[in-house]
Image (spheres, coloured by chain):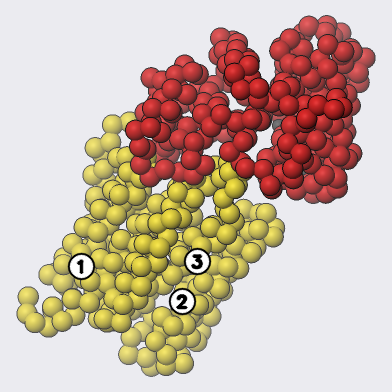
Chain colours: A yellow, B red
């Protein structure tokens, strides 16, 4: 590979690896709590924010981040208010945000909607690395929440009865998920970001029997497969997101086949 | 139920509205420290709701509740051990019996179990006869085994108040007998108060000091030696056919 490759690849590799770790960290709870749809939906909703950013000529992240976190808060609000398994409401919210994005996305922009929908490492700058690094710091800060998140995942009522502020911690979790999907959009694309949240923890779940084991193994799988996928994409000029997810899917398949049930 | 004695639970005219209807209405009662109180009542009679109120999980619409002469929010949760109404986990749920029992000690999920915690948890599991299943995933345990894991978890923190919601669900005859002897042993050792929801009238009469009959309103409460009599039972359960006092009433799970 020549210098140009490395110039493009370096921020993607750095940011990608950091994002991989954060995704696995929250992904454990996404998988355990059955929030896959919320994760995927938030990523789609983020497109509305991205489009507005492009339209206004601002760094898309600056708009997409608050936009998606707002949508996430609305989801929680609706869920708490109606007590519904609010699949439908969430679905409406996400598709509307996405539709908004498609309408306002400027036709003449250099990077078209497809770059955001499927990811484009050419869009990844050092700025995005810094954003990912900030998320890593947030994740480190959230280590104290891990035992509360895990407890509430096991049994919400018990966690509440033991005096944990479950509702507030759940809010932090969903906002964190929103931030994670937004930062990973340029790398893997809106359509594929939820895979980062889901596949490594789902794989880890097959070969561990504790929450902590699942977390560690998920971090490991994610931290390896993301840079590996990016290298692969650079070598063969494959799309970055697709390469990462192809490798993760392969690892998952291997684990599923090896698992003795 | 009694005056002068310190009470573990004290309810004054509590009502709980859930949706359109009241799950509990004007319930006033007290359970003295050291009592073994069994709550009986038909499905939907508000038994679980009552326990949820005591756990601080359900706010009351009217009235007030005190535990150990203090408002619920002021009571350290570690003083309360609970066995919830049974629920199931899927096979791959990443938690071992041991991890569940450890929450009884720490009140949160542990990333790693230190040796002391591990030893206490194993001892608690031993007490419910499940030491050999300590490393089993909760998702593969049978219903009755899971209830016993919950019991171990409730006991390991050495609570002053035990709240059990149909703990015998899914237990075999032997385990159910064990449950009662474990609870009785624990009570004698720790002068703890036990509040247990059950459907087993004869066992309730035999093992408990106090009985509460709940069907939205409190239909009867008092010492188990005093009743309630068949007439009241029939009225509460709406039992039409023949009923013998020593047979189980309403032995479905609610
Ligand atoms: N979240 C809820 N919303 C509306 N009604 C509820 C809710 N939870 C329970 N109920 C109703 O309250 C009543 C009491 O329920 P519960 O305390 O679980 O009864 P039990 O444990 O005695 O069988 C039931 O009629 C039940 O349908
Ligand atoms: Mg019940």
How many numbered marks have been drawn onto this rendered protein structure? 3
Identify the residue at horizontal 64%, vertical 64% (top origin): A77
Tell whether B49 sits left or right of A3: right
Question: Ligand 2 is found in which quarter of the picture?
Answer: top right
* Above or below for B17 versus A240: above
Residue position for label 3: A175
Same-chain check, marks 3 and 1: yes
Question: Would the CB of label 2 be found within 8 Å of ligand 1?
Answer: no
Q: For numbered disc 1, what is the local secondary structure?
A: helix
Question: Which quadrant is home to the N terminus of chain B?
Answer: top right
Q: For numbered disc 3, what is the local secondary structure?
A: helix
Tell whether A135 sits left or right of B89: left
Of A12 and B96, nearer the camera is B96
Residue B39 image-quadrant placement? top right
Locate residue A110, reporting x and y percent. Answer: 32, 90
Tell whether B18 sits left or right of A92: right
Pointer 3 with pointer 1, Cβ within 8 A: no
Pointer 1 with pointer 2, Cβ within 8 A: no
Locate residue B244, reporting x and y percent. Answer: 83, 6
Of A240 and B98, nearer the camera is B98
Residue B215 visible to the viewer: no
Residue position for label 2: A65
Locate residue B108, reporting x and y percent. Answer: 49, 44
Q: Nearer the viewer, mark 3 or mark 1?
A: 3
User: Which mark is drawn over residue A230?
Assistant: 1
Crowd around label 3: few <14 · some 14–19 · many ≥20 (10 Å) = many
Q: CA distance from mark 3 to mark 1?
A: 27 Å
Q: CA distance from mark 1 to mark 2?
A: 24 Å
């Amino acid at each position: 590979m020549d210098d140009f490759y490395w110039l493009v690849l370096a921020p993607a590799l750095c940011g990608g690896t950091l994002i991989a770790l954060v995704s696995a960290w929250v992904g454990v709870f996404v998988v355990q709590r059955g929030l896959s749809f919320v994760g995927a939906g938030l990523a789609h909703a983020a497109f509305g924010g991205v489009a507005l950013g492009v339209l206004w000529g601002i760094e898309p992240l600056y708009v997409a981040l608050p936009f998606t976190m707002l949508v996430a808060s609305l989801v929680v609000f609706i869920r708490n208010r109606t007590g519904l398994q609010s699949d439908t409401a969430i679905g409406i919210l996400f598709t509307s945000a996405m539709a908004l994005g498609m309408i306002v996305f400027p036709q003449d922009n250099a990077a078209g909607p497809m770059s955001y929908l499927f990811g484009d490492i050419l869009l990844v700058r050092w700025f995005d690395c810094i954003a990912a690094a900030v998320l890593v710091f947030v994740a480190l800060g959230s280590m104290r929440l891990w035992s509360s998140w895990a407890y509430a995942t096991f049994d919400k009522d018990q966690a509440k009865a033991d005096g944990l502020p479950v509702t507030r911690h759940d809010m932090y979790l969903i906002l964190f998920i929103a931030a994670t999907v937004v930062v990973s959009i340029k790398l893997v694309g809106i359509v594929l970001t939820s895979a980062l949240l889901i596949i490594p923890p789902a794989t880890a779940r097959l070969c561990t029997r504790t929450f902590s084991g699942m977390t560690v193994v998920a971090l490991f799988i994610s931290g390896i497969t993301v840079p590996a996928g990016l290298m692969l994409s650079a070598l063969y000029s494959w799309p970055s997101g697709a390469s990462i997810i192809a490798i993760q899917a392969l690892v998952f398949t291997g684990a599923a086949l090896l698992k003795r049930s | 139920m009694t005056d002068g004695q310190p009470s573990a639970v004290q309810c004054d005219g509590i009502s709980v509205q859930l949706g359109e209807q009241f799950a509990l209405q004007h319930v006033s009662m007290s359970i003295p420290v050291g009592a073994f109180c069994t709550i009986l009542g038909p499905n939907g009679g508000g038994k679980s709701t009552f326990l949820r109120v005591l756990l601080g999980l359900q706010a009351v619409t009217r009235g007030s509740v005190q535990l150990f002469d203090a408002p619920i929010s002021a009571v350290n949760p570690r003083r309360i051990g609970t066995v919830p109404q049974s629920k199931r986990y899927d096979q791959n749920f990443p938690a071992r019996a041991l991890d569940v029992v450890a929450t009884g000690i720490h009140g949160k999920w542990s990333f790693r179990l230190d040796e002391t915690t591990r030893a206490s948890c194993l001892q608690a599991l031993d007490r419910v006869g499940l030491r050999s299943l300590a490393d089993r995933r909760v998702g593969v345990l049978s219903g009755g085994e899971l209830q016993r894991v919950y019991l171990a978890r409730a006991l390991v923190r050495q609570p002053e108040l035990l709240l059990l919601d149909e703990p015998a669900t899914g237990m075999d005859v032997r385990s159910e007998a064990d449950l009662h002897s474990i609870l009785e042993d624990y009570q004698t050792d720790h002068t703890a108060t036990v509040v247990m929801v059950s459907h087993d009238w004869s066992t309730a009469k035999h093992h408990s000091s106090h009985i509460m009959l709940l069907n939205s309103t409190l239909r009867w409460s008092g010492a188990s030696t005093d009743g309630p009599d068949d007439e009241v039972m029939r009225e509460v359960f709406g039992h039409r056919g023949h009923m013998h006092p020593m047979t189980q009433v309403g032995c479905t799970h609610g």
